[in-house]
Amino acid sequence: MSEEVLVRAENVGKKFCRDLKRSLYYGVQDAASDLFLHKGSRSNLRKQEFWANRGINFELRRGECLGLIGRNGAGKTTLLKMLNGLLKPDEGHIEMKGRIGALIALNAGFNPVLTGRENIFVNGAVLGLSRAEIKARFDEIVDFAELEDFIDTPVRAYSSGMQVRLGFAVASTLQPDVLLLDEVLAVGDFAFRQKCMQRVKKFLDNDGTAIFVSHNLHQVQNICSEVMYLKKGCSLYLGPTNEGLQAYHNDIEEVPAGNTSQHSQQSPVSQPVVIQHLEVNGGTSAQTFGEITFSMVANSQVDIDGVAAGFSVWTQDDQVRLFTLRNDFERDHFSIKQGENRFSATINLPLCAGNYCLKAMLFHADTSNPIVRHGFENAPFHFTVKSGSHDPSLTKQSIHGEVVAINASEIRWDRQ
C-alpha cells in the first residue's frame, strides 16, 4: 500500500442557516467579504445558523477506504459534498489529489434531457478525459450498467435503479484515484449490488481510495478499512472498522435484549406444541465471527416423530440475514417427547456487530409442514452481536449484507 496521501481534511467545518431569507443575506455578505479580501472569522454562528460539520480531521492513502456512519442528519453527505468541491468549507482545509469519481446524489452529474450516451461523454469530460479515452471505455461502462437497450434514451426516462447503475458505472470505470459513494448500493437489485461490491474491492486492490457512506453496516464492514462515526456533525470515532461499528451500536438507542414478552401470544400452527423460550449462548449476546449457540425450549402435549428444527436471524427492520438449511433427512430429524424438549444449534456466526432478532420453527421433516413457529406472528427474541476477531475462513456472503444459508454439515445440533 502506497504512503501517498490522496485525501486530507484538517479541522473542516460547514454551517447552514435554517431560514432561507437569512441564508441568502448571509451568502451575499460572505461573498462581498471574500471579494474585498476582508476574510474575517466565520467560526461564530449568526442567527438561525448551525454547524452541519465541525472539527473533522482525517487523511486517506492509496488502497484505503473510509466508511462514514451515523444517523440521518449526522453530516455524512455534507462532508462528502465538501470533499467533492460542491460545497465550500467555512472552516479548515481540504486537500484532494488525483482524479475524483463521485456518486453523491441519485442522479448527480446527469443532465436529464441528454441521453445516457451523451451523459457518459459529459461526465468523462468533467473528469478531464479526452473523447478518445472515453470512447475506449464506453463499451465497458454500458456493459457494466446493463443499459445497452436504453443508452440512447434521455436519462429523465430512467428509473432510479437505472440511474444508479449508469452513475456507478461511470464513476468507477473512468479510472478515478478517489471514489466518493453515498448510499448508492442501497438502490438496485441483488445481483447489481453484488457486482458493485466486487468492483469497489477491485478498485481498492488496485490502490484506489474510497469514501463510502452507507446505513448498511454489513457493507461497511466488508469494504472499509476504517470508519468515522459522525453525530450532530462531529466525529465521535475514527479508527478500525469493527471498533467503530461497536461504538456506533453502543451509542444509539438499543432495543432491549431478550424475549420481548415471555408470555407473548404463540401463533402455533399446531396447538399441542409451544415454544416457550429462546436464547443465544445461554443469554442475549454473541461475538462477530465467533461460535454461537441458538437454543430453544419447546413444551409438547404429545410425542411426535420425524421433527426438524430451524433458526433464522433477522435485522431490526425485519430483513432476514441468516437461516439454517436442512439438506439431510436422515441426519436432521429427531423426535419430540411429551413434556419439555430442548434443542440447540451451534454455528460460526458470520454477522457484523448489531442488534438482531432470532426466530425459530419446528416442522415435520418429511413434508416441511410447520408444527409451531416463534417470532413470526408474535414477538421475536432480541439479541446483540458485539465486535470480535475476523476469521477470513468464514463465508464472505454475510458481510455483504446479504442472506446466508448455513448448511446442515456446518451445524452442530444438540437435542435433550
Image (cartoon, helix red, strand yellow):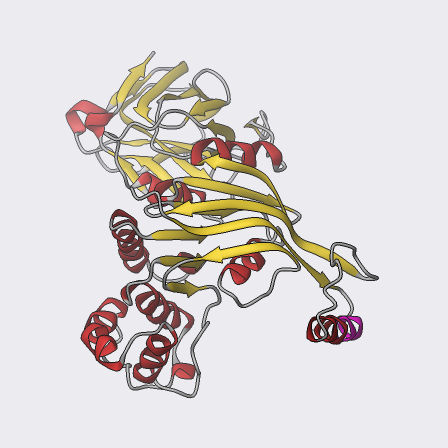
User: Can residue 70 be seen?
Assistant: no
Q: Is residue 343 above or below residue 288?
A: above
Identify which residue is drawn at 51% across, 22% down.
284
In which quarter of the view is residue 406 placed? top left
Q: Is residue 318 above or below residue 272?
A: below
Residue 128 x %, y %: 34, 74
| Left or right, 11 with reference to 365 | right
Residue 146 falls within the magenta-colored stretch: no
In which quarter of the view is residue 167 placed? bottom left
Residue 131 x %, y %: 26, 81
Q: Depth check: 363 or 80 in front?
A: 80
Residue 89 x %, y %: 62, 60
Looking at the image, how many numbered discs can be counted on the residues? 0
Q: Depth check: 348 or 388 in front?
A: 388
Residue 192 x %, y %: 29, 60
Q: Depth check: 172 or 209 in front?
A: 209
Q: Which region shows up in magenta?
A: 20-26
Kindly give the residue lying farthest to the front in the view shown.
Answer: 37
Decide whether the magenta segment is chiefly helix, strand or loop: helix
Kindly give the residue lying farthest to the top in the view shown.
Answer: 416
In which quarter of the view is residue 46 placed? bottom right
User: Can residue 14 be seen?
Assistant: yes
| Left or right, 272 with reference to 177 | right
Residue 23 falls within the magenta-colored stretch: yes
Identify which residue is drawn at 16% across, 30% down.
328
Identify which residue is drawn at 63% across, 37% down.
253
Kindly give the residue lying farthest to the right in the view shown.
Answer: 47
Q: Is residue 206 above or below residue 253?
A: below
Q: Depth check: 83 or 155 in front?
A: 83
Q: Is residue 373 above or below residue 300?
A: below
